[in-house]
Amino acid sequence: RELLKAGVKLGKKAPRDLRIEANRVVGADPRAAVLGLSEAVIAEPKDADGWLSLARALLSIKSDAYTGNERYDVPLNASGAAYLAYERATTPAQKATALNVLHEALKRRAQYRPAIDALKASLAVQDVPALRKVLDELQAQHGFRILDYKADIEAAQPRVCVQFSERLQTGVSEFAKYFTVDGKD
């Protein structure tokens, strides 16, 4: 919010009117919508719908239209706005929607594990079958999985070296209990 304050001057329009106007133009001019919504959330910082609209407007700026640092800044700001919408949400539907938008912003930043977690949390609040399918696809593409493996079957003790997509839990020294071959550890 403080970062927004530095770049936005408050006008005389009511936050609700700013939000309505911005949501009307977001498809045609998302940058103008972002400016109006930024002004609205500065004037009314506890408005979850304002923050959610700001996050959506930021995400509606197409990545091929980014200039300068926007490739980093736009998705980062969308993540922040979606999170603030979640924090200020008063209904389960608002919370679920904010978490879903947060997942979209995190995906745009290639932060797949947090995106998966945000989408799971959204579905825990409000189960939407279409989003469950999105979660399944996201987990299949970017969830925990084996990336590569090498087998050494010529050694006295045959072994397999497995490369996972994420770091394994620290503090665990014996992983044999997690793997079975033909039903045996």
Image (cartoon, grey):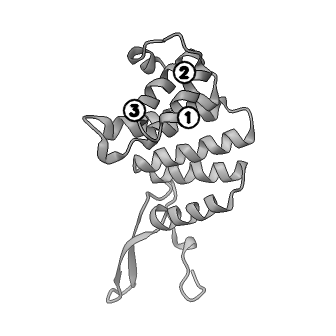
> Is disc 2 surrounded by few (<14), some (14 to 19) or many (20+) residues within 10 Å?
many
Q: Which residue is drawn at 40% across and 46% down?
A: 109
Pick the front one: 142 or 32: 32
Q: Mark 2 and 1 residues: CB-CB less than 8 Å, in contact?
A: yes
Question: Which residue is nearer to you in this view: 48 or 123?
Answer: 48
Q: What distance separates the C-alpha of mark 1 from that of mark 3?
A: 13 Å
Report the residue marked by disc 1: 53
- Give the residue displayed 37% in from the left and 45% down from the top: 62
Q: Name the residue beneath numbered marker 3.
A: 31
First reached walking from the N terminus: tag 1 or tag 3: 3
Residue 26 versus residue 47: which sits nearer the camera?
Answer: 26
Between the C-alphas of marks 2 and 1, the distance is: 10 Å
**Tag 3: Cα neighbours inside 10 Å, few (<14), some, or many (≥20)?**
some
Task: Answer whether labels 2 and 3 touch (C-beta < 8 Å).
Answer: no
Q: In which quarter of the image is residue 132?
A: bottom right
Amino acid, disc 1: Ser
Can see residue 161? yes
Residue 79 appears anywhere in the view? no
Residue 47, image x and y in percent? 63, 25
153 is higher (above) or lower (below) than 166 = below
What residue type is disc 2 on?
A: Ala
> Closer to the camera, 18 or 121?
18
Residues at marks 2 and 3, CA–CA distance in whole angstroms: 14 Å
Relative placement, left or right, of 184 versus 29 is: right
Judging by the rendered image, the residue that carries numbered circle 2 is: 40
Q: Looking at the image, is mark 2 or mark 1 earlier in the sequence?
A: 2
